[in-house]
Structures are given as structure tokens and as C-alpha cells.
Amino acid sequence: MLAQSQIPDFLFGDQNTEQSVDGGDPASIRWRIFRNGEEILDFVATLKPESETATRISVDVVAPSNGRFARTSERLKQHPEIKSLYLDAARETVASTLEHRPFEPSQLAQSLAVAAITNAKSIMGPSGEELEKKGLASIHDAYEREAAGAR
């Protein structure tokens, strides 16, 4: 069942991605994400039987060890909020598949918000830096007016 599921494309923005799912190992499912034929990221669900009627599923995000995207592992360590977003997406992919329901993007709201806020400056580029400067200037001006007795 999990081998027929897909990690949602919207996680990768406007980048054209392809996916393949490797379900050959009964103890794991691996969603391999590619851009222009080159692997950029893997999502792995590991299945561990807990009893005859229960299986524990854990998920992980694995970066390629070579190629153009070999630094992804390092970047995910530098940005744990992005890794958390990817892990939440993998968990929701598994949950929605097993519960026979559509993927629910709202399940990612908290981790998406944290990732967006944490990376706002880099997302917005130079305009983000300008907004930050204006925001800091406004705060500085407010403190100066308050110190001068003005409101």
C-alpha cells in the first residue's frame, strides 16, 4: 500500500521533480526524489513489527552521498526546521495512506510556518534584508521617541 503513495510535490517548490518508490524490502519503503535525473533526497519509512496486529513505522530523510546534492545532508543539519518539515510530510504521507484518506497539508502548518519564518530573509533575498533593516529602524525610532517622552 505504501509503495503506491507519493511524497507531495509542493514540498519542493517550483522545482520539477520526479519520484520513484522502492518497496522491494518488506521492512522499508524508500521514496527517491529526483530533479533532472539526479537524486536530491530520499524519504525512508522503516517498518518494525510490534505484534501480530501492529507495526511501528518510523521515517527519516536521507541525502545522497555523492553528486550535485551531496551537501544536502550538511544543509539539513544547518536547517533542522527544514528537515522537520520533510519528516512531517513523510509522516503525513504514511498516515494518510494507511488511513485511506487524502494527504492533509494542514498537518504541516506548524512546521511550514517555522521553516518559513526561520528562513524568511533567505527566501525573500535582498528585499528580505531591506525589510529587516526597515523593521529594525522602526523599532529603534520607537525606542528613541519613547525615551524622549513621545508616544
Image (cartoon, grey):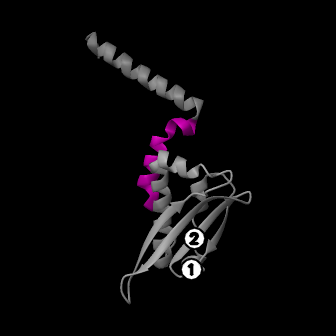
Left or right, 112 with respect to 71, comes to left
Q: How many marks?
A: 2
Q: Which residue is mark 1?
A: 25
**The residue positioned farthest toward the front in the image shown:** 66
Q: Dot 1, crowdedness within 10 Å: few (<14), some or many (≥20)?
A: few
Query: What residue span does the magenta drawing correspond to?
Result: 104-124
Query: Where does residue 151 sit, x and y in percent of width and height?
Result: 29, 17
Residue 105 visible in this rendered orientation of the protein: no
Residue type at numbered disc 1: Asp
Residue 39 got which mark? none
Query: Where does residue 51 sit, x and y in percent of width and height?
Result: 36, 86
**The residue positioned farthest toward the right in the image shown:** 36
Query: Where does residue 142 sit, x and y in percent of width and height?
Result: 34, 19
Decide whether the magenta segment is chiefly helix, strand or loop.
helix
Residue 8 visible in this rendered orientation of the protein: yes
Residue at image location 50% in from the left, 71% down from the top? 45
Question: Which one is in front, 134 or 41?
Answer: 41
Residue type at numbered disc 2: Arg
Up-down: is 9 above or below 47?
Answer: above
Q: Which residue is mark 2?
A: 30
Residue at image location 64% in from the left, 52% down from the top? 69
> Which callout, 1 or 2, points to the residue nearer the camera?
1
